[in-house]
Image: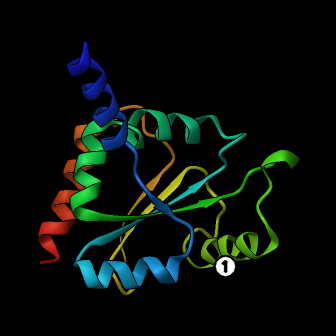
């Protein structure tokens, strides 16, 4: 029983990823750690495909393990419900990111960037054929090509 409780505790800990909200801080961390940045534009409380992408890909154990070693994660959220509204500073920051990386306002929209903010790859929406493995493989291919 003690082993089971310990295993559950560590599995919950290991699957929790930290998503940055500050892009400049993420660029600094990516430079220092020699990692790429994955920027996700989401409508967390209204966009069905955004919610599905988060649950099926971003919250998976396989993605968590890969991201921990290879990525700095940034989420630019655009919630609609008043109870989920971001403060004015964060909203302005997210709008600034959208102006630069998501001019057409697509949701979900995910961008892979180098530590200077150069776009390396984009994912528009939630492709039905996308699996956790195929998503990781596409990031890995870009990562290896940029070394």
Q: Is residue 137 above or below residue 9?
A: below
What residue is at 66 percent from the left and 61 percent from the top?
A: 105
In the rendering, at what x and y percent does residue 50 appear?
57, 42
Q: Residues within 10 Å of mark 1 (few under 14, many from 20)?
A: some
Local secondary structure at mark 1: helix
Question: How many marks are shown on the rendered structure?
Answer: 1
The residue positioned farthest toward the right in the image shown: 82
Q: Quadrant of residue 13?
A: top left
Q: Is residue 39 above or below residue 130?
A: below
Which residue, given by chain and number where applicable, does mark 1 sit on?
Answer: 96
The residue positioned farthest toward the front in the image shown: 2
In the rendering, at what x and y percent does residue 28 appear?
39, 85
Q: Is residue 2 left or right of residue 76?
A: left
Quarter of the figure that contains the N terminus: top left
Q: Is residue 5 left or right of residue 84?
A: left
Tell me the colour scheme of the image. rainbow
The answer to whether residue 117 of the structure is visible from this angle is no
In the rendering, at what x and y percent does residue 53 appear?
48, 39
What residue is at 67 percent from the left and 49 percent from the top?
A: 43
Q: Is residue 37 left or right of residue 139?
A: right
Foreground pick, 127 / 91: 91
What residue is at 61 percent from the left and 51 percent from the top?
A: 107
Quarter of the figure that contains the C terminus: bottom left
Q: Quadrant of residue 37?
A: bottom left
In the rendering, at what x and y percent does residue 18 appear?
44, 57
The answer to whether residue 50 of the structure is visible from this angle is yes
Q: Is residue 94 above or below residue 139?
A: below
């Amino acid at each position: 029983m003690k082993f089971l409780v310990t295993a559950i505790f560590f599995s919950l800990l290991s699957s929790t990823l930290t998503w940055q909200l500050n892009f400049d801080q993420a660029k600094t961390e990516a430079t220092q750690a020699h990692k790429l940045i994955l920027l996700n534009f989401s409508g967390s409380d209204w966009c069905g495909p955004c919610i599905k992408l988060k649950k099926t890909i971003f919250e998976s154990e396989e993605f968590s393990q890969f991201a921990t070693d290879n990525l700095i994660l940034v989420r630019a959220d655009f919630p609609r419900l008043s109870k989920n509204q971001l403060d004015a500073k964060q909203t302005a920051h997210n709008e600034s990111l959208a102006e630069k990386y998501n001019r057409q306002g697509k949701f979900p929209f995910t961008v892979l960037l180098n530590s200077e903010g150069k776009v390396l790859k984009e994912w528009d929406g939630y492709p039905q054929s996308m699996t956790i493995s195929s998503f990781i493989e596409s990031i890995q291919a870009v990562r290896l090509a940029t070394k």
